[in-house]
Amino acid sequence: MDDCQFKVSRVALVGSGAVGASYAFALLNQGITSELVIIDRNFQKAEGDAMDLNHGLPFSPLSKIWAGDYEDCGEADIVVITAGAGQAPGETRMDLINKNSRIFKDIIASVMNSGFKGIFVIATNPVDVLTYVTWKYSGLPASRVIGSGTILDTARLRFLLGQEFDVDSRNVHAYIMGEHGDTELPVWSNANIAGLSLMEYKAQHNNPTDERLEEIFVQVRDAAYHIIERKGATYYGIAMGLARLTKAILNNENSVFSVSALLDSEYGLDDVYIGVPAIINRDGIREVLKLNLSDTEQEKLHHSATVLKKAIASLDL
Ligand code: NAD
């Protein structure tokens, strides 16, 4: 009999703030892992969340949740990092680079000292840069260091397109690629509704116009600013995206998500973590999908990569 059948899955969450706690709740609700250990600089917050979440165990298939320490990462399949500062109103994600990269140096060292051999999933911003930082500091193969990338932006795009066409957003296939931030881009050339290309749909319906598509993209790109203005932070959407990604890894799904992946000549780029559609399974990133981009999309992706490379170069790695 296959030994793997009896392996207890463990997720270690580092950072139990708004994003981390919402992610923990999503894991519990959906019964995605057997064990969840919560680590936070503020131990009381981790402990309070663990106590609170434990009271949901009778309604969930999870078996164990506790507030722990980095030693607990040694047995973890996935370490998810949501620790660090978030954007204040008016701040860009890139503004967080110095604060959060300093925090990451210590976190990654502590995780690796535990003997961790699993997969990192990073959500802290600026996520593409911090995923690169994690890859460098951990020494793990790039396939086992995944950033949440444009998972959330892609979900926002699919939601808005679903509303626009009055079609279930799960039947809308469209990606946001590039930086999770101001230089991201919509890949209209490959967007489709259940196989019917967006361009063909536009031709058939005389709608949506290019101006309307641009409006939708701007809504996606600037969504975080609008939510932060209203409630100080965004967390439910990304928490659901992280939970979905965790499930795809643990269940060896070979599902496609627009994660932040290290490029190695794909799209004519290398040595940069950036949002691209990729196949995800139990080994992490199996393959980056090479979409046939339009010239404008290719240019925008390169611009986004240039901004990210500049940000990475500003750090002393
Ligand atoms: P938050 O302030 O609510 O939570 C951050 C948590 O990290 C706190 O509990 C804090 O105690 C903990 N922390 C800070 N330094 C730590 C350290 N050195 N070790 C352990 N824990 C530490 O912030 P939030 O709203 O949960 O956001 C967290 C991060 O997620 C931010 O960087 C934010 O920009 C990012 N975010 C990313 C996405 C995405 O799509 N990738 C979406 C939303 C938010």
Image (cartoon, rainbow, N blue to C red):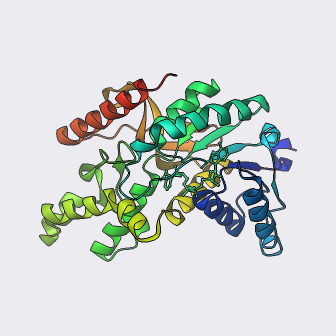
Which x, y percent locates residue 82? 59, 49
Residue 276 appears in the figure: no
Q: Nearer the viewer, residue 88 or 227?
A: 88
Which x, y percent locates residue 104? 60, 36
Q: Is residue 11 left or right of residue 167?
A: right
Q: Is residue 175 above or below residue 2?
A: below
Image quadrant where residue 52 sits: bottom right
Q: Which of 317 and 167 is in front in this view?
A: 317
* Residue under the point 24% across and 37% down: 298
* Residue under the point 68% across and 43% down: 79
Q: Is residue 163 left or right of residue 2?
A: left
Q: In this view, does 10 lie to the left or right of 218?
A: right
Image quadrant where residue 57 sits: bottom right
Residue 283 appears in the figure: yes
Which x, y percent locates residue 128? 45, 39
* Residue under the point 17% across and 68% down: 208
Q: Which of 1 and 186 is in front in this view?
A: 186
Which x, y percent locates residue 16? 67, 56
Q: In this view, does 126 lie to the left or right of 57?
A: left
Q: How many labels does the image show?
A: 0
Q: In this view, does 120 lie above or below 115?
A: below
Task: Say which quadrant the N terminus sits in.
Answer: top right
